[in-house]
Image (tube, coloured by chain):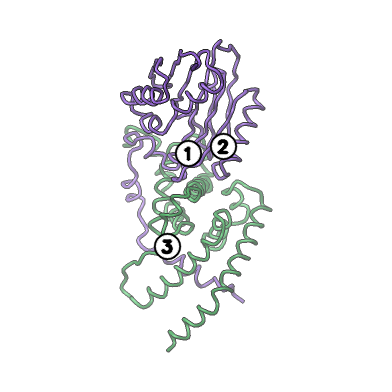
Chain colours: A green, B purple
Amino acid sequence: MSAENPAWDELFELLGPIHDDVQLFARRIAGSNAEGDDVFQEAVLRAARKLSTLRDRARFRPWMCSVIVSVHRTRCRRAFFRRLVSREVPDVPGDDGSRWADERASARRAQAALSSLSPPQREAVVLFELQGYSLDEIAEIQRTSLSSVKSRLARGRDRLRAYYAQLAPDHSLTQEVARG
Amino acid sequence: MADPWSDDLAALGEHSRRGLRSLAATRASVPTETKMRFHKAHPALAALIALLVIGVTAPLAYAFVRHVLVTVDPDKPADQVEKDVSDQLHAAGVEATVKATTGDDGQLKVYIQSSDENLGSDVDFNIGGEVRKAGQGRGIYVECHECDAARQTLVLHAATGGDVLESIDDDAAVGPAITKALAAQGVTDVEVKVAPDKITVVVDAHPAP
């Protein structure tokens, strides 16, 4: 593979130090880990094709995140894809059933809440809250202005707040039942 | 006071780490691009087929056409895409009729009809940052000589119908499909030339009586 296309070697050399971080980003903005892996795989393919357009290799991390953002949005646009995408968080076997069950429930709730946001808002919230990126970095990744990022974060948080406000009675009830 | 979603986001953060692929696994999982068909290697673009339809009427117009880069935002509804493409072509001095449709499968098709025979090779589409030739390098050019507007429309619709588009990548099948579709409309004086970059349909029939 690499012998046929040297760009692959360079791509994976650049990808190495940030591989887990950008893969996590893809998983967190997608509906599930499996869907995130598909987004990431498609982004790697796209990155290989477009690597020659990246002038400053030092900016590979935000550039790669931009590619993931682009793939994610393209997938979100496709109506037929939206019908097929499950926003369920798939079960993952673990050695501590109860703890993992709690984590899965919380993760599922977070995914559902994030899915109520527009893709740009979802990306901004994930980048800021989970990935720890600065506003400037998010603006570079989303290829937009700082004020747009601030707006997306503010609106995203408003929507999350509304989502959890609507969820609150059921959520409380569930917790009460769980307490027994 | 923490936001009500803080704990859930933290759980999502942890959950997303489960079964994370290694770099080697990622590399192994990514197929060699050169071995993939275009629509497999470009799954995002497979749903965004820009189909170029050029209707050339006789006498052929000779015009100098500059390179035209048309930017398409597939996030917009079809009617807005139609307007955007039309405006961009108009701004570039290209007279064309644009029709955009979105199928049930989400596939966006942009039809550009122009009397400029050189248009096809000079139009690129920029879709989500990916620049590509209209019609994936294979447009359908319809030369309908001495046809009136109604007949030209009939020929264009028949030559670019569903059966034709389904076989547009099959060199052996696309010619007969076009001939058959036109024959069904009573158009029999037809010559179809299939080339790698374009399919030319020449209709010499005169307007129906």
Q: Which mark is residue B16?
A: 3
Extreme residue in the front direction: B209
> Which residue position is annotated with label 1?
B48
Q: Where residue B15 sits: x, y (%)?
A: 41, 66
Q: Chain of mark 1?
A: B
Q: Is disc 3 placed on a helix, strand or loop?
A: loop
Q: Quadrant of residue A95?
A: bottom left
> Disc 2 vs disc 3: which is toward the camera?
2
Report crowding for label 1: few under 14, some 14 to 19, many 20 or more residues within 10 A (C-alpha): some
Give the amino acid at mark 1.
Answer: Leu
Q: Chain of mark 3?
A: B
Extreme residue in the right direction: A147
Quadrant containing the C terminus of chain A is: bottom left
Which comes before the other along the chain, label 2 or label 3?
3
Give the amino acid at mark 2.
Answer: Val
Report crowding for label 3: few under 14, some 14 to 19, many 20 or more residues within 10 A (C-alpha): many
Instruction: Kindly indicate whether the residue at mark 1 contacts the one at mark 2 (C-beta within 8 angstroms).
Output: yes
Which comes before the other along the chain, label 3 or label 1?
3
Please check whether the numbered discs 3 and 1 fall on a single chain: yes
Which comes before the other along the chain, label 2 or label 1?
1
Q: Chain of mark 2?
A: B
> Disc 3 vs disc 1: which is toward the camera?
1
> Which residue position is annotated with label 2?
B72
Please check whether the numbered discs 2 and 3 fall on a single chain: yes
Q: Where residue B34 sits: x, y (%)?
A: 34, 33
